[in-house]
Amino acid sequence: MEKLKIGVIGMGRVGLVTATAFASLGFEVWGSDKDKNRIEKLKRGKTPFFEPGLQELLNKGIEKNALHFCANNKELIAEADVLFLCVGTPSREDGSADLSQVEEVAREIALQAKGKKLIVEKSTVPVKTAQWIMRTINLYSRGKADIEVASNPEFLREGKAIEDFLKPDRIVIGAENETAKEKLLQLYEKFNCPKIVTDIKTAEIIKHASNAFLATKISFINLVADLCEATGADVNIVSDAMGLDRRIGRAFLDAGLGYGGSCLPKDVKAFTLIGENFGINFNLLKEVDRINDSRIDRFLEHIHQALWTAKSKVLGILGLSFKPETDDIRETAALRIIPKLLEEGAYLKLYDPVASKAFMEQFPEDPSSFTYVKSPYESARDAHALLILTDWKDFRELDFKKIKKLMITPIIIDGRNIVDPEEVISVGFEYYPMGRRPWHPGRF
Ligand code: UGA
């Protein structure tokens, strides 16, 4: 059987990982994006964003001549047998997914394709999107090509995307005829994990339901965190004990500032609307979203509890990305907390191991009210408090003795519960976590 050639349309975080990972598995891959600068950069072997392991895969793919990048889809549509759609599906104002990029690409494929092609939805899309793609194909291709549509949702976490691609928990294939099914199984034949082969609508729902469930777990534990705070209990111990029940599991039970990023917030809103469009009450997910929103105010309460007022205080901010191991700042807690602190008149010293550059593009430095610094220690220097917004591992391993000496008042307000309270208290810090009792002199 001849080896299938792969096209990946959209060189974002999902598309580029998909393209480079398939190339590493021995496939010939074409990757396209309408952003010409991004394509030029990729041709020169430069990744446009930070993702552990991606640079190495890109180098190898280019070296082996297994990866080809193009700024339009013409060559890709002509060369590839299987076309993965990895274009953006951003939120519209009402929370529903904007599928105009998917429609545009479907139309382009319909107009240009010749011979047999399999279009595969990889981006997260609402149930029944494949039907719309098929309708578009039928409208525009007028029988020129033999085009099929399938779904193969991704479950890639940023920061662990390569590992998730190459060692997945499961592979979901939504296909409605044997050839589409066989082609996708052929692409994943080296993978030794459960493969769920089902109809397309079920595959589409699996993706949205998975992300909505992860978000529900996080909001659930944050709700419990509020109760722990109100009663003096400890949410970390609640999570650990709940997590030992194999039916529950410990993952995604970390309380704190809640979920951000380009996926969970968007998918919860989109899935809620899909449910409602089909007449189903999805209020459960509305609550998940509301609880997540409320984390910011809860954190600000902690700041006020510790500092009385943030006005004229110097605050060290540790962590700008929405989670560790990424420079992605979409829907990050920092984007909501920082403007509020600036409004209150605080002076901020911002630090992140990799996301400062991305943050600076949205928040250019203003030395009169905030500055970017190059180390957590610089962030602590002359500060009245250190605020932890992202759970980067490095923040857990700081030299807190040194930090205390640098600060004006030794206060840590931890939005991610990553610091060991015993350690910082023994050094002389006041410590304010989420969903756990604060450690400060007034308590004793
Ligand atoms: C998420 C899913 O985990 C992936 O499976 C999915 O493929 C991806 O969305 C997508 O749809 O493309 P990602 O957005 O990279 O991946 O991030 P997560 O690891 O899910 O974390 C999301 C947010 O939840 C982060 O802000 C994180 O800090 C927060 N979180 C996570 C918590 O607040 N508590 C937890 O216990 C876990």
Image (cartoon, rainbow, N blue to C red):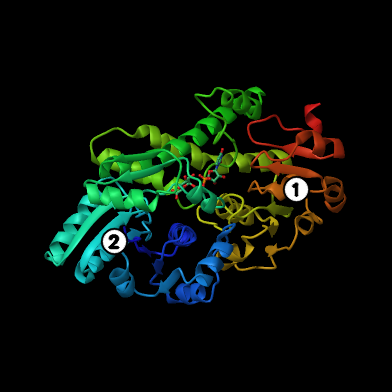
Q: Position of residue 304 (x, y in %)?
A: 67, 42
Instruction: Choose top left, top right, bottom left or bottom right for residue 197.
Output: top left
Instruction: Choose top left, top right, bottom left or bottom right for residue 53.
Output: bottom right
Categorize mark 1 by other alpha carbons within 10 Å: few (<14), some (14-19), many (20+).
many
Residue 115, placed above or below residue 439: below
Please name the residue shown 12% across and 64% down the image. 143
- Quadrant the C terminus occupies: top right
- Quadrant the N terminus occupies: bottom left
Q: Position of residue 65 (x, y in %)?
A: 47, 72
Q: SS for tag 2?
A: helix
Dot 2 amino acid type: Ser
In this view, the residue in front, 117 or 130, is 117
- Residue 390 visible? The answer is yes
Give the side of residue 140 with respect to residue 218, left or right. left
Dot 1 amino acid type: Ala
Residue 94, placed above or below residue 49: above
From mark 2 to mark 1, how far is it between C-alphas? 45 Å
Residue annotated with mark 2: 100
Q: Position of residue 256 (x, y in %)?
A: 60, 39
Q: In the displayed orientation, state which residue is furthest to the left.
A: 142
Give the side of residue 235 with respect to residue 386, left or right. left
Which callout, 2 or 1, points at the residue further toward the start of the chain?
A: 2
Categorize mark 2 by other alpha carbons within 10 Å: few (<14), some (14-19), many (20+).
few
In this view, the residue in front, 168 or 191, is 191
Please name the residue shown 57% across and 24% down the image. 242
In this view, the residue in front, 238 or 363, is 238
Q: SS for tag 1?
A: strand
**Residue 385: mark in rendering:** 1
In this view, the residue in front, 226 or 253, is 253
Give the side of residue 340 with respect to residue 427, left or right. left
- Residue 96 visible? The answer is no
Please name the residue shown 67% across and 38% down the image. 417
